[in-house]
Image (cartoon, rainbow, N blue to C red):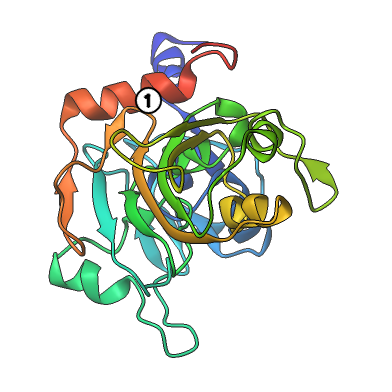
Amino acid sequence: MTAADNSRHVNTIRLNKFLARAGFGSRRSVEDLIAAGRVSLNGDVVRDLGRQVDPERDRLAVDGTAAILPRDYRVYAFHKPLDVVSTLKAQGGQASLLPYRLQADIADRFMPVGRLDSESTGLLLWTDDGQLNQDLCQPGTGLWKTYEIEITEDLAPTPRAKLTAGKIELDGRKCRPCRLEMKPDGTTRQWIMKLHEGRRRQIRRMFRKVGLKVKRLHRTAVGPISLGLLRPGDFRRLTNQEVAALRAAVNRPRNSK
């Protein structure tokens, strides 16, 4: 193998990873695009999931749209308002995220990370890094998500212990242990909850299991990234330091605090 061949091999990247970083979805979802014959490499359809490509020399496209790695990946913080679904398409007459993205002139390649139900508000991250998006949605990363919760009745010690000890079962499997503390200067109906997971309407369903109803649910942080004073409907680009801290938190060993 020549020195030129060695250099080319070092600079190559796996096809699914390239497409994820180019903003065409997670590694798993882009594999479906590849298998369906919707991806071309230098003009020819490619279905080899393990194919290595050279970002500097190879030309890739999905359904005819060029796939190009952005020069720098970005992450935005967004304050999701009440009664807005966390999708880019309106559902059941409810507002979607699309008008907010258009108003802020956020490029199409940026996608929301995970979801907040329409009744919940707060921090929703967006990124054009498909791999980071996927990593942030994996419960195994151990990334804490922080919520302010208001319930309709006081929370007694027994149901509180059940909530935090991982004894609540949803969809046939137990939730992971979480943290729950009274909100500073709040009441026994106002709490701060931190958990690793993000199952569908998980917090509301957990409280329902102990006979309580969540009246208000507001996400204030995802790992080291806080919502801060960002107004509902507004975006804020994360600093390089914040993005580095977010990546470090995702890559931290699962048993780290």
- Residue 157 picture location, percent across and down: 63, 33
Image quarter of residue 98 = bottom left
Q: Residue at x 45, y 28 (%)?
A: 12
User: Please, which residue is most extreme toward the right here?
Assistant: 172
SS assignment at label 1: helix
Classify residue 213 by image quadrant: bottom right
Up the image or down, 257 lies above or below 240; here it is: above
| Label 1 environment density (alpha carbons within 10 Å; few <14, some 14–19, many ≥20) | some
Query: Which residue corresponds to mark 1?
Result: 247
Q: Is residue 153 left or right of residue 119?
A: right
109 in relation to 182, above or below:
below
Residue at the spot 41% in from the left edge and 21% down from the top edge: 249
Residue 250 in the image: state x and y as whole percent. 46, 25
19, 223: nearer the viewer: 223
> Residue 78 location in percent, x, y?
25, 54
Please name the amino acid that badge 1 sits on: Arg
